[in-house]
Image (cartoon, rainbow, N blue to C red):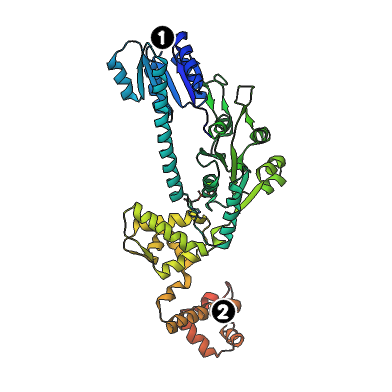
Amino acid sequence: MKKTQRLLAVDDEAGMTDLLRRVLTAEGYSVTTCASAEEADGVLAGEPFDLVITDLVMSGKGGEHLVRRVRDEHPDTEIIVITAHASVDSAIEVMKQGAFDYLRKPLLPEEILHAVNRALELKGLRDEVRALRREKENSLHGKILGRSPLLQRAFERLRRAAHTDATILIEGESGTGKELFARAIHGESPRASGPFIPVNCGAIPSNLLETELFGHARGAFTGAHAERIGYFEAASGGTLFLDEIGELETVLQVKLLRVLQEGCVTRVGETQARAVDVRIVTATNKNLLDEVRQGAFRQDLYYRLHVVHVVVPPLRDRREDVLLLAHAFLHRYTEKYRKSFSDIDPKAAWILQHYDYPGNVRELENIIESAVVTGRGKVLRPAHLREALGEDLFGEVVGDSEDLDLPFAEAAGRVVERFERSYLEAQLRRFGGRINRVARAAGLSRRTVERKMNKYSLERRNFVPQGNDAAVDP
Ligand SMILES: Nc1ncnc2c1ncn2[C@@H]1O[C@H](COP(=O)(O)OP(=O)(O)OP(=O)(O)O)[C@@H](O)[C@H]1O
Ligand SMILES: [Mg+2]
């Protein structure tokens, strides 16, 4: 199905715009006309065009202005310039600025059609290449790694829902991969060649968020010099990803609900609604149902949003994924920073697998990135992680993994030593440093207790409660 291509014809002579409209409409194009560059500016801000065809010399801003504007702000739009003054120099000048072609007046219908068809044909090819490249980028960067059943299940749910237009709510702790999932849904959906527009509802002040989402008319408020299309309209044909939806203010919740119910948006300062064709995916690291119960989030909106509901599990609940991810990140950052890491040694792997990752996959990624940046060598070792995690965290995780370097008997001996030390400490504390009581409770001789205290440098006086005379019961 070929969609109708939209053309904008600009000329201050009505005869010329009439001619263009007649010729191009007959060819099946949808044609909008403007009598000045200023008027065209406004129209361009409001809707997308495939091609602009403009006179070069007009009263007010000339065609050159439009050429620059289109080049800078609408890179997907082609532009053809018409000139009456047959000045080849100025025509070449505008071609350099980014015009696709130029035509000389008087215009013949065949000439117009030939130029327009050719421009749009090339544009089609370019769009295709761009879409392919985007797809390739998506599949490289947007790949979801994980073999844990928990993640596979979440992904399966999303894959099935992706093919519909159902609204999807993704819940998960920070850094679990919610945005990655949202991009994957878009990539797997029939809308994949359309835009994917992410909006962080928590990061934009709510008065601004309203015009960003819905757009505004010219003069809707002080400072609104030109009209502006909102994210809903920009995402038309594609997916709008509303991140941190839990942060959305009540007023905007009402407006969003209306869009979902009616399928159209009204720009701020306008009264007429415009139809939009968007798929909505939302994400939050809050429990949205709790927010509903506390009255912070509208219940009706909640039910609209969670038609399909997916929870991305925290990394500590799917430790099977840690090494897979770690290796992928190691590879990614080794290439990026031109280092030579190619493997992770068993002890480093053990440490990675035993850490809790409050920041989930993003934290793991940061740890590996920082280890790669600051470290050297082919194999990632605990020393690299010590730097990346920081001394305190490293110590907390590592605990007994140092023993992995030792033969079994020695490693077992270390474990026994650690046990003896903490056992004695606990008993000494319990009996306020009274060794006879400790010996009796432990079923050991007093001599053995003293020998072990010596071995572990445990001093009796450190366990005697303050103010108690140490002489009571040695
Ligand atoms: N399963 C995965 N496979 C590969 N990379 C992942 C995976 N999950 C997350 N990542 C990576 O971890 C980082 C964080 O992911 P993302 O931004 O999607 O998380 P998020 O849940 O949106 O976090 P936040 O709530 O903080 O916005 C990204 O760089 C992403 O590429
Ligand atoms: Mg996110």
Percent x, y of residue 286: 62, 48
Does residue 381 lie above or below 369 as drawn? below
Front of the two marks 1 and 2: 1
Q: Give the Cα separation between the discs numbered 1 and 2.
A: 96 Å
Mark 1 is on which residue type?
Ser
Percent x, y of residue 22: 49, 15
Identified at 44% across, 13% down, the residue is 11
Does residue 192 lie above or below 377 as drawn? above
Q: Quadrant of residue 86?
A: top left
Question: Which residue appears farthest toward the front when viewing the image?
Answer: 110
Secondary element at image label 1 = loop
Percent x, y of residue 247: 61, 41
Q: Which residue corresponds to mark 1?
A: 59
For label 1, being within 8 Å of ligand 2 is answered no
Q: Are marks 1 and 2 in contact (CB under 8 Å)?
A: no
Residue 308 is at least partly visible in this image: yes
Does residue 184 lie above or below 90 as drawn? below
Mark 2 is on which residue type?
Leu
In the image, which disc is placed on residue 428?
Answer: 2
Residue 35 is at least partly visible in this image: no
Percent x, y of residue 27: 49, 22
Identified at 51% across, 49% down, the residue is 180
